Image (cartoon, helix red, strand yellow):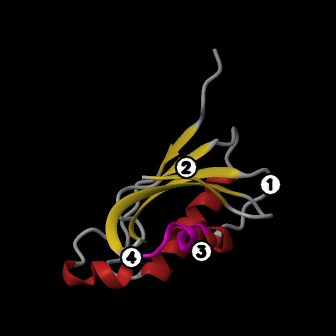
């Protein structure tokens, strides 16, 4: 029976620093993509892009799924083929804020959002 290789990242984001955290996430994904055997999926914790306890800053730190996918693709410097990633973040969607998880396939051509929860 086939199995999937998963990397779970123990990641402590810098509170309130979206750009810094996305850069760090990109570096971890890049490192994971160079493992042998290579994982098919890299998973990050809840609110990895901003930190969990940001008090009143949630609204300012929330981004759309498309924005996060684009920013992760820019931060990822790994080799082909594509790699799947799950990242917890505060999502802005239809004028509401959600504590979401983005599932995205990072590819040098274009990131593909699979599902946002």
CA gap, disc 3 to disc 4? 13 Å
Q: Residue at x 58, y 45 (%)?
A: 41
Q: Main secondary structure of the magenta part?
A: helix
Q: Residue at x 40, y 82 (%)?
A: 17
Callout 3 touching callout 4 (CB < 8 Å): no
38 is higher (above) or lower (below) than 27:
above
- Circle 2: is it few (<14), some (14-19), or many (20+) Cα within 10 Å? many
- Callout 4 secondary element: loop
- Circle 1: is it few (<14), some (14-19), or many (20+) Cα within 10 Å? few
Which residue is identified by label 4?
62
Q: Is residue 68 magenta?
A: yes
Which residue is identified by label 3?
71
Image position of 94 (left or right of 69): left
Q: Magenta residues, as a range?
A: 63-69
Q: Earlier in the sequence, mark 1 or mark 3?
A: 3
- Callout 1 secondary element: loop
Which residue is identified by label 2?
42
Q: Give percent across and percent down for residue 2.
A: 65, 20
CA gap, disc 2 to disc 1? 15 Å
Which residue is identified by label 1?
80
Q: Earlier in the sequence, mark 4 or mark 2?
A: 2
């Amino acid at each position: 029976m086939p199995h999937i290789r998963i990397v779970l990242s123990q990641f402590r984001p810098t509170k309130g620093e979206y750009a810094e955290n996305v850069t760090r996430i990109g570096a971890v994904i890049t490192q994971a993509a160079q493992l042998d055997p290579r994982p098919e999926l890299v998973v990050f914790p809840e609110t990895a892009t901003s930190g969990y306890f940001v008090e009143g800053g949630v609204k300012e730190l929330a981004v759309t799924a498309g924005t996060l996918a684009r920013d992760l693709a820019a931060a990822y410097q790994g080799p082909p083929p594509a790699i799947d990633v799950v990242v917890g973040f505060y999502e802005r969607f239809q004028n509401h804020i959600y504590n979401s998880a983005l599932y995205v396939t990072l590819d040098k051509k274009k990131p593909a959002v699979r599902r946002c929860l």
